[in-house]
Image (spheres, coloured by chain):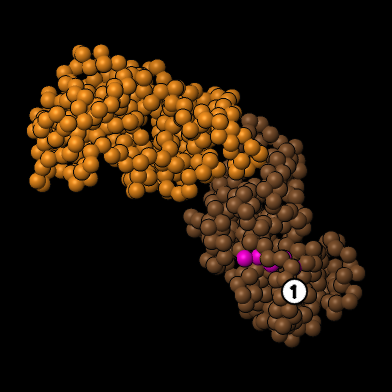
Chain colours: A orange, B brown
Amino acid sequence: MGFIITFKKTQKILLLMIYDCVIIGRGPAGLSAAIYLARANKKVLVIGKENKIWKNEVNINNYFGIGEITGKLLMEKGEAQAKSFGTEILNSLVTKISVDEKGLFNCLANSKEFTSKKLLIATGSSAAKKEIINQEDFIGRGVSFCVPCDGFFFKNKKVIVIGNGEYALEEAIELLNYTNDVTLVSNGKKLSFDKKLLDDKEIKFEEFIIEKIIGEKKVEGIKTNKEELKIDGIFIASGNADSNDLARMLGLLVENNKIIVNSEMKTNLSGVFAAGDCTPGFGQIATAVAKGAVAGLTISKEI
Amino acid sequence: MGFIITFKKTQKILLLMIYDCVIIGRGPAGLSAAIYLARANKKVLVIGKENKIWKNEVNINNYFGIGEITGKLLMEKGEAQAKSFGTEILNSLVTKISVDEKGLFNCLANSKEFTSKKLLIATGSSAAKKEIINQEDFIGRGVSFCVPCDGFFFKNKKVIVIGNGEYALEEAIELLNYTNDVTLVSNGKKLSFDKKLLDDKEIKFEEFIIEKIIGEKKVEGIKTNKEELKIDGIFIASGNADSNDLARMLGLLVENNKIIVNSEMKTNLSGVFAAGDCTPGFGQIATAVAKGAVAGLTISKEI
């Protein structure tokens, strides 16, 4: 990737705005952290899409002090509370994060870059993404989940990116830094972004369904519902960039799909924190709120 | 202490009621645990006095989803929520806890014994109790904080119990199992219980102020504002029985005045859990609520 370009971009944004903390994720953990940070006069941006589970009229009655409330109303109250202290909220997904040479974090969302001193990942739980029946057999042998991590190993090779969303598009674009032979495969699904976005990129597109990976010791090809194709690498980027994907982009320690943190919600990378269901432990609103609070307190002290 | 009497008492209560869990402490941690337990159809008793800090009209605005609320109202809502699932609440202090030969826990409160399968300590933070200027020099050398732990070492010795509340009275009564020479010393304070309660007990009472402990390698006496007295042992039981005292009665691991727990809120003693500000970590409503929730979930699974 063009180092100089990134540097220039960062410089431009430096003049505009550096957030004290960008929080990725808009659930109870992220918003609880935002409340603590904004209340302590920190400049905070929460980036996240409204979570569908909170949109439902599910009744919550085990969160202390609130009696019975719908998930929707609880989230509305929590967001209003975070905003009342000055938190900004951006209704978007984050498709990429990186750390620059100054130790600042850059988040790509809505095709814009947002720069911050600290980063909190609070994207909720994420399951391992299963796209092809035998993908497990080829992880590290041609199957990867992270272009910034492994793209380098596919220089001038023939690779596919599996996915139908913006995240897959970002991964495919990123791959062009390493090879010109990139195909986006929607694996039978409809694209969730405007197909025109592909037009000015040198990315091929296929809708076929992948039935299995072919290969002895490493990926040699794929069998689709139409044909057999020779390829060298497969990047799985289905759905949105979840906590596992974001963690991989930064090199965070992940075990059993959870980001490893200490009691202060610090990850293994300085300046990066994680809270809520993307970290180990009980997945309750109460625990997410507490982890967010602890992350907020810890980050406040560090800024 | 009369083993047979304890056994008979337990037997009587067995016929009446065994709670699944007794929760000592009536703050956010204790009540959050009660919500989880009672909601899971467990028989729960919360024992605690209303905490003065919650009585004040202090505004809380950093607890996710609740906007701004007074501590008083938050606690009222939390108690109503716990009761709505069947939690019983007893407005009392616990002065003694013990575990019987069947592994059941007995809590003494309001001069009654309450029996449970599991025990949760959620009594909030507690500071080390300082009654005499040089008491630190004599801890383990005649100064103790726990009659059930150390009373045995003062058989037929001359001992004093420092304190002016029910907890001190209980400790003094307990000491009579080991020695007949027990003096309750209020250390200049007024008794907070009816002095008549002392009349039928063979406990002496003094109001003097202790200026310092006298002794070479161990307690040999005390210098009061009136005289010098020869004594063998001092039990400090000022204030109420707090988490440290309760922990000592059961032999729980305590570090820096906090009860040590694992990520599931289990202490080192099977069946005993601790949550909230009496455990290590950040002392926030959010964290207390989460720890209570985790304790409640863990205990539910064990019953």
Q: Quickly name the residue at label 1.
A: B12
Q: Is residue B71 above or below residue B202?
A: above
Q: Quadrant of residue B209?
A: bottom right
Q: Quadrant of residue A233?
A: top left
Q: Within 10 angstroms of label 1, few (less than 14), some, or many (20 or more) residues? A: few
Q: Amino acid at mark 1?
A: Lys
Q: Residue at x 81, y 72 (%)?
A: B184
Q: Residue at x 24, y 20 (%)?
A: A5
For the stretch drawn in magenta, what is the main secondary structure? Answer: strand
Q: Could you tell me how many numbered marks the image carries?
A: 1
Residue A75 seen in this snapshot: no
Q: Is residue B20 above or below residue A295?
A: below
Q: Horizontal placement of A46 versus A14: left or right?
A: right
- Residue placed most toward the observer, B287 or A188: A188
Residue A235 seen in this snapshot: yes
Q: Horizontal placement of A255 versus A185: left or right?
A: right
**Is label 1 in a helix, a strand or a loop?**
helix
| Location of residue B161 in the rendering, given as x and y in whole percent from the top left corner | 76, 72
| Location of residue A140 in the rendering, given as x and y in whole percent from the top left corner | 18, 43
- Report the magenta residues as a range: B113-117
Q: Is residue A104 magenta?
A: no
Q: Residue at x 59, y 70 (%)?
A: B251
